[in-house]
Image: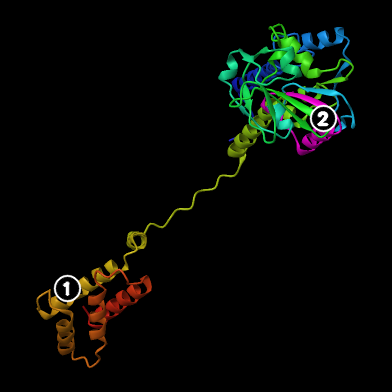
């Protein structure tokens, strides 16, 4: 059969499938990028989940705020700046965690949100997606400069703190801390359960703007709003690349290539007839019976079958009763065939003893069955 597409119908089908795949790829890239930007607390997004309003409020209030679009490893050391780590995308590497800790120990402050924010701090938070679907009003749990500025905040409780070390619970209670604060070296870390207070929709809720400003602190303190973890910067982080639409493009290309290779190889490859198995019924019976005894682990049954067959043939030749004891049967055999060798006595005694025994090894059973077969041939039974 020829491997080329000689039919016009095949060519039309192939062109239509390629066009549909290209259209779907373009649409997935366009809409995925737009939806990802809208659902991300980035200062570039005017959507409800974005953070452009909070960034512009800080600028208007005279804060030294700027977007940080370099890797975390390039954060300035011995800096009194505040780093906003709002719902970072992707997974934190060990180098990024060490860089953040070094930044805090030398005097920096980090405001991180969500489970991924806790992971970037080298800590842990338990995600609660169902609880986070509804905003909640949270009362202050401990007096501090932050809770004095905002006795209540509105937050989507998407997670709660479960990190190690001493952390002061500011909101949410000790059982499910929603906002915690702890010191590290000369700096400190403030963690939120979600980025609700700094989003365009959440910053308008009562107490949220005061809460945000209190967490940032002194207006003379530089504020670095990390946009690198949202995919804005010199290059996209590895974790964001994995979640980007590029992975679907690569997956489609690989799938299409695999389909082409498999189809061509099946149509154009050499045809090799399958080897015909020599089905010999006696050999199959022996193999099946041997496998049955092997799985059962009962070698004594094989000995018993061979012994009963040998007894039947001998007693039939002698005209003796079939239930003759082994000792009498051995004596009758020696008398009938005038044997001076008493090895048949030992063989029949061993076979009699092996019946029903669980201690007979496969090697011993094989020896007894072979001996019975040899005596059958020797006595011409």
Disc 1 residue crowd, few under 14, some 14–19, many 20+, Cα 10 Å = some
Instruction: Name the residue carrying label 2.
Output: 187
Is 229 positioned to the left or the right of 295 in the image?
right
**Which tag is nearer the camera, tag 1 or tag 2?**
2
Image: 167 above or below 330: above
Look at the image and say whether residue 112 sits in the magenta stretch: yes
Left or right of 242? Residue 380 is left
Picture coordinates of residue 289, whole percent (x, y): 32, 61
Question: Which residue is rendered at x = 15% and y = 79% of the image?
Answer: 325
The span from disc 1 to disc 2 (Cα, nearest Å) is 96 Å
The quadrant in which the N terminus is found is top right
- The residue stretch that appears in magenta: 90-115
Does residue 135 appear to the left or right of 292 in the view shown? right
5 to 264, vertically: above or below: above
Q: Secondary structure at mark 2?
A: strand
Choose top left, top right, bottom left or bottom right for residue 282.
bottom left
Secondary structure at numbered mark 1: helix
Residue 129 or 155: which is nearer the viewer? Answer: 155
The residue pinned by badge 1 equals: 312
Q: Quarter-wise, where is residue 248 in the image?
A: top right
Measured as percent of width and height from the top left, residue 147 is found at 71, 16
Magenta-colored stretch includes residue 291: no
Q: Of the residues under marks 1 and 2, which one precedes in the sequence?
A: 2
| Image point (70%, 19%), residue name | 143
Q: Where is residue 27, by image quadrant?
A: top right
Disc 2 crowd, CA 10 A, few/some/many (<14, 14-19, 20+): many
């Amino acid at each position: 059969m020829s491997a080329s597409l000689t039919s016009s119908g095949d060519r039309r089908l192939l062109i239509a499938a390629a066009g549909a795949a290209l259209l779907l790829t373009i649409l997935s890239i366009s809409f995925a990028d737009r939806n990802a930007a809208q659902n991300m607390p980035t200062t570039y997004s005017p959507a409800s989940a974005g953070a452009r309003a909070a960034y512009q409020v800080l600028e208007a209030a005279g804060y030294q705020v700027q977007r940080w679009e370099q890797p975390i490893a390039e954060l300035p050391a011995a800096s009194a700046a505040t780093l906003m780590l709002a719902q970072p995308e992707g997974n934190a590497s060990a180098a990024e965690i060490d860089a953040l800790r070094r930044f805090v120990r030398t005097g920096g402050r980090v405001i991180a949100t969500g489970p991924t924010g806790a992971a970037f701090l080298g800590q842990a938070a338990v995600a609660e997606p169902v609880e986070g679907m509804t905003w909640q009003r949270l009362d202050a749990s401990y007096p501090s400069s932050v809770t004095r500025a905002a006795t209540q905040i509105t937050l989507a409780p998407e997670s709660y703190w479960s990190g190690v070390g001493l952390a002061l619970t500011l909101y949410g209670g000790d059982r499910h801390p929603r906002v915690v604060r702890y010191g590290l070296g000369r700096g400190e870390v403030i963690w939120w359960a979600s980025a609700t207070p700094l989003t365009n929709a959440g910053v308008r809720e009562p107490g949220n703007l005061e809460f945000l400003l209190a967490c940032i602190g002194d207006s003379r303190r530089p504020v670095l709003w990390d946009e690198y973890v949202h995919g804005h910067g010199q290059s996209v982080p590895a974790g964001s690349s994995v979640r980007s639409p590029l992975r679907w493009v690569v997956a489609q290309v690989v799938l299409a290539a695999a389909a082409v290779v498999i189809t061509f190889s099946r149509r154009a490859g050499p045809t090799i007839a399958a080897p015909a198995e020599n089905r010999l019924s006696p050999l199959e019976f022996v193999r099946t019976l041997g496998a049955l005894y092997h799985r059962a682990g009962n070698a004594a049954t094989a000995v018993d079958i061979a012994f009963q067959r040998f007894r039947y043939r001998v007693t039939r030749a002698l005209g003796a009763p079939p239930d003759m004891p082994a000792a009498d049967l051995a004596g009758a055999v020696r008398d009938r065939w005038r044997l001076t060798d008493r090895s048949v006595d030992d063989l029949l005694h061993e076979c009699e003893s092996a019946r029903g025994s669980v201690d007979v090894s496969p090697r011993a059973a094989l020896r007894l069955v072979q001996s019975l077969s040899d005596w059958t041939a020797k006595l011409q039974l």
